[in-house]
Amino acid sequence: MNKPAVFLSAIAGAVVVLMTSCGKDPNDPGKEYMPDMYRSPSYEVYSSNPNFPDSLTMQAPVKGTIPRGYEFFEYPSSNEGYEAAGRDVKNPLALTDENMKEGERLYGIYCTHCHGESGAGDGNLVKIGKFPPPPSYSSAPSSRGGLMKDLSDGKIYHTITYGINLMGPHASQISPADRWKIVMHVHKLQGQVSGAAAGDSTSAAVKDSSNATAMAK
């Protein structure tokens, strides 16, 4: 077949395809080549799905997958984990004005509705009777022993992560770094933080309440 014949055959084929792909019915989409490439079929999140062996549309993450930015906290949600965290875990962030101010801001978002602005357990939800007051950071005993004002970095971080009693876990809401900033502000409400950071991570100090108690005796 010579070139003119091939050219005419191609034109004739294109005309046939064009004519069969279009119609007078405005609701008829006509013919499409591989329509799924243009409009992939979608599945509702909880609907069955024949494309997976378990017939589920919403698939679980691959085993061992961790979220971006995830930081593993090796201390379990138990009294033993709480005590171990209180003994071993220290705040990795520098005690600066910037971190303190951000900790205060985050505390205002996540904590004041129950604990109150001053940490006295008089937040708005407590005032309207929705929840009983949590213990004051500066003057009340902890439900897990000891005084609230003596809670260490690790114990506060553990409690924010896992929750306790009526307080739910906040690990899914607050990033690890932001939890540590809240810890700093809680120390301020406890009365453990003395001095001002003034932009210098070494000029702010955290009181050792156990030493202070021993010196007072």
Image (tube, rainbow, N blue to C red):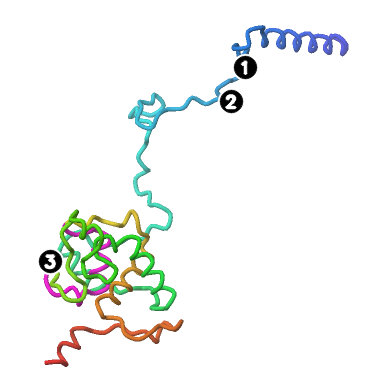
- Residue 199 lies left or right of residue 85; in this view the side is right
Q: Residue at x 16, y 92 (%)?
A: 215
Quadrant of image for the C terminus = bottom left
Q: Position of residue 155 (x, y in %)?
A: 23, 69
**Residue wearing tag 1:** 32
Which badge, 1 or 2, comes first in the chain's sequence? 1
Secondary structure, mark 1, is loop
Q: Amino acid at mark 3?
A: Ser
How many marks do you count on the picture?
A: 3
| Badge 3 density bin: few <14, some 14–19, many ≥20, Cα 10 Å | few
Q: Residue at x 38, y 32 (%)?
A: 45
State which region is magenta.
143-165
**Is disc 2 surrounded by few (<14), some (14 to 19) or many (20+) residues within 10 Å?**
few
The first of marks 3 and 2 along the sequence is: 2
- Residue appearing at x 30%, y 81% in the figure: 193
Which quarter of the picture shows residue 163? bottom left
Compared to residue 153, the image places residue 81 above or below, namely: above
* Between marks 1 and 3 in the image, the one whose residue lies nearer the viewer: 3
Q: CA distance from mark 1 to mark 2?
A: 9 Å
Measured as percent of width and height from the top left, residue 118 is found at 27, 72
| Circles 1 and 2: CB atoms closer than 8 Å | yes
Residue to which mark 3 is pinned: 143
Image-based side of 100 in relation to 152, left or right: right
Label placed on residue 107? none
Q: Dot 1: few (<14), some (14–19), or many (≥20) neighbours within 10 Å? A: few
Q: Amino acid at mark 1?
A: Glu
Residue under numbered circle 2: 38
Q: Is residue 154 left or right of residue 202?
A: left
Q: Residue at x 25, y 73 (%)?
A: 88
